[in-house]
Image (cartoon, rainbow, N blue to C red):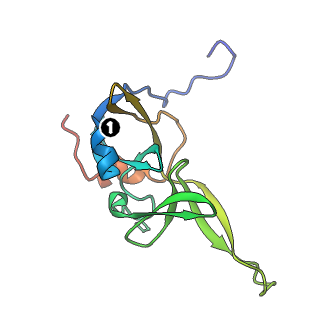
């Protein structure tokens, strides 16, 4: 039990931050890939902000580092190159458009499926970029391609 009376989650892990490169380099390339504690991630530098997420798309494992960044509903998203799913850079939400079929004149509205892609934390220290893996214990769809049998890179241990 935690001091506040809540139960401790045995799945929750804390990861140390890992240096993945230099700020100068990512500012030029605007994206980079890295392996952090055996997990493959992509880091984007977009409009002055850093974002890191699992590199394989939650839908079918598409390579997000090869996608374009576009705004949808005012939110910057990576567009997966395989089937064009849109994932918000800031939160990892899957976005989709919906219409009310009973109202043919209605404009499609952008909606969220919730968090589908695991987002990691980026920090900058002394010109170096660090990524800290998410330790949030919720099950995220992108975990499927980042762990287990479908993981692209294999654990060295
Ligand atoms: Fe990304 Fe299908 S694999 S949209």
| Residue furthest top in the image | 3
The percent position of residue 125, horizontal first and vertical second, equals 37, 26
How many other residues sit within 10 Å of disc 1, few (<14), some (14-19) or many (≥20)? some
Tell me how many marks there are.
1
Figure check: 128 above or below 98: above
In the picture of the structure, the residue carrying the numbered disc 1 is 23
The picture quadrant where one finds residue 102 is bottom right
Q: Is residue 41 visible?
A: no
37 displayed left or right of 88: left
Residue 45 image point, x, y percent: 40, 47
In this picture, is 155 found above or below 141? above
**Residue at 32% in and 62% down:** 66
Residue displayed at 45% across by 58% down: 58
| Residue that appears at 36% across and 52% down | 55
**Cβ(mark 1) to ligand 1 < 8 Å?**
no
The furthest residue to the left: 156
Residue 51 occupies which quadrant of the picture? Answer: top left
Looking at the rendered image, the quarter that the C terminus falls into is: top left
Q: Position of residue 151 (x, y in %)?
A: 30, 51
Q: Quadrant of the N terminus?
A: top right
Apparent side of residue 5 relative to residue 127 in the rendered image (left or right): right
Q: Is residue 114 left or right of residue 26?
A: right
**Left/right of residue 75 with respect to residue 60 in the rendered view:** right
Which residue does the image show at 49% across and 29% down from the upper left? Answer: 12
**Numbered disc 1: secondary structure:** helix
Classify the position of ligand 1 by quadrant: top left, top right, bottom left or bottom right: bottom left
Residue 10, given in percent of the width and then of the height, sits at 50, 27
Say which of 140 and 107 sits in front: 107
Can residue 93 be seen? Answer: yes
């Amino acid at each position: 039990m935690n001091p506040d009376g809540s139960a401790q989650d045995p799945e929750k892990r804390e990861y140390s931050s890992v240096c993945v490169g230099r700020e100068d380099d990512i500012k030029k390339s605007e994206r980079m890939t890295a392996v952090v504690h055996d997990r493959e991630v992509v880091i984007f530098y977009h409009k002055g902000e850093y974002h890191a997420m699992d590199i394989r798309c939650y839908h079918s494992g598409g390579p997000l580092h090869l996608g374009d960044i576009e705004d949808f509903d005012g939110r910057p998203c990576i567009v997966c190159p395989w089937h064009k799913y849109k994932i918000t850079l800031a939160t990892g939400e899957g976005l989709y458009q919906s219409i009310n079929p009973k109202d043919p004149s209605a404009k499609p509205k952008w909606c969220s499926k919730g968090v589908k892609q695991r987002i990691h934390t980026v920090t900058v220290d002394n010109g170096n970029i660090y990524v800290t893996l998410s330790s949030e214990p919720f099950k995220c769809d992108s975990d499927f391609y980042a762990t287990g049998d479908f993981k692209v890179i294999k654990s060295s241990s």
